[in-house]
Image (cartoon, grey):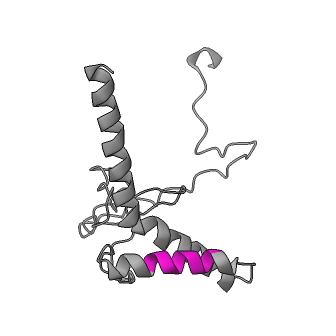
């Protein structure tokens, strides 16, 4: 047996021992399981939602997820278990991740500036006429454009 064959066998043996140690600590994949606490918490949330909405839930699956989470909690692998409240930032609002403030000038136009009252003895200008209704066939005389000069 050559040197490279011995090195390869030693590396394979070491990898097998590492996999066994990680699986025993709850960190390895083993039989396709995952050891990410967030994945188990998500699964528990899905199972709870299904149960709350009257849909069937596999009790064995629920028990498996609960046992895995309990083992992770005892082993100190779970972060703080707190429920988000309505006080936190809402996506798309200031303070939330991914929020971009509106561009300057975006949104509704500012209100018109207040006009000064007419001087004493001067009549106020007439109020602007209402725009024609959308889809109206005949324009009002005040809004019709003047005829071209060749019609005179």
> Which residue, as the protein is rendered here, is positioned at the far front?
1
The quadrant where residue 5 appears: top left
Is 146 situated above or below 95? Answer: above
Q: Nearer the viewer, residue 24 or 1?
A: 1
Image quarter hosting the C terminus = top right
Which quarter of the rendered picture does the N terminus lie within?
top left
Asked if residue 62 is among those painted magenta in the image, a careful observer would answer yes
Observer-nearest of 59 and 101 = 59
Q: Position of residue 17 (x, y in %)?
A: 34, 51
Residue in the image at 36% along x and 38% along y: 12
From the viewer's perspective, tell me whether residue 81 is left or right of residue 46. Answer: left
Q: Which residues are magenta?
A: 61-69
Left or right: residue 28 compared with residue 130: left
Which residue is painted at 29% across and 77% down in the image? 76
User: Looking at the picture, does residue 47 appear above or below residue 142?
Assistant: below
Residue 42: within the magenta? no
């Amino acid at each position: 047996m050559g040197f490279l064959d011995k090195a390869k066998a030693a590396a394979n043996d070491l990898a097998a021992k590492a996999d066994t140690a990680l699986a025993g600590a709850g960190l390895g994949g083993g039989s396709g399981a995952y050891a990410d606490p967030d994945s188990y918490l998500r699964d528990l949330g899905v199972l709870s939602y299904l149960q709350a909405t009257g849909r069937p839930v596999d009790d064995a699956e629920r028990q498996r997820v609960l046992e895995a989470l309990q083992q992770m909690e005892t082993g100190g692998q779970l972060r703080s278990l707190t429920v988000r409240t309505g006080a936190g930032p809402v996506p798309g609002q200031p303070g939330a991740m991914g929020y971009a403030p509106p561009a300057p000038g975006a949104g509704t136009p500012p209100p018109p500036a207040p006009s000064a009252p007419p001087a004493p003895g001067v009549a106020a200008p007439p109020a602007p006429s209402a725009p024609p209704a959308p889809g109206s066939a005949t324009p009002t005389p005040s809004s019709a454009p003047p005829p071209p000069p060749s019609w005179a």
